Amino acid sequence: MSIQVAILKILASHVTGRATLDSLKHDLAILSSSGDDWHARIKRLASRVPELDIFSSFYVLRDVEGWQITSAGREFLQALEAVTQDNLSPAPTDDSAIRAEGELIVVGHRFRNRMRTQRDSEQGASPRRRPFREPH
């Protein structure tokens, strides 16, 4: 269940791992309105554990003060999030590194030319061009 994964995530985000029921509801409301990325991430995590029951597994304890994630709950959440598409960074390819390096050079070159042309046109003069000379 995705709501149970969300509860684990919220409780784990608290330093003590504890939250009152009102606080938990408030956090869930904020996260549910935070956009599609949150929903998609929680749904992907929950799809890995369709039969999850955070209470019978003793991942979360309830008492009169609120809910608290247990150490087993933290370990479970870490294992669940260990290797997912959410936390893998895309590996740069050699082509993208070369392309990025070339873009910096081209952008700098274009910027200088554009500024000179712009300055000359603002002064009312046509841009002067240097005659082409062959290297000796």
Image (cartoon, rainbow, N blue to C red):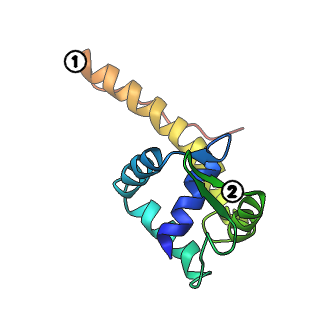
Residue sitting at the far top: 123
Judged from the image, the secondary structure of the residue bearing numbered disc 2 is: helix
Q: Locate residue 127: give its quadrant.
A: top left
Q: Which residue is mark 1?
A: 124
Mark 1 or mark 2: whose residue is earlier in sequence: 2
Residue at the image position 42 percent from the left and 54 percent from the top: 28
Give the residue at mark 2: 97
Residue with the most extreme left position: 124
Residue for point 64% across, 75% down: 56
Residue that appears at 44% across and 32% down: 113
**Residue at figure coordinates x 51%, y 41% from the top left:** 107
Horizontal and vertical percent position of residue 23: 46, 44
Instruction: Give x and y (percent) for residue 100.
Output: 62, 52
Residue closest to the eye, 76 or 58: 58
Kindly identify the amino acid type of the residue bearing the numbered disc 2: Ala
Density class for disc 1 (Cα within 10 Å; few <14, some 14-19, many ≥20) is few
Horizontal relation, residue 30 to residue 45: left or right:
left
Q: Secondary structure at mark 1?
A: loop
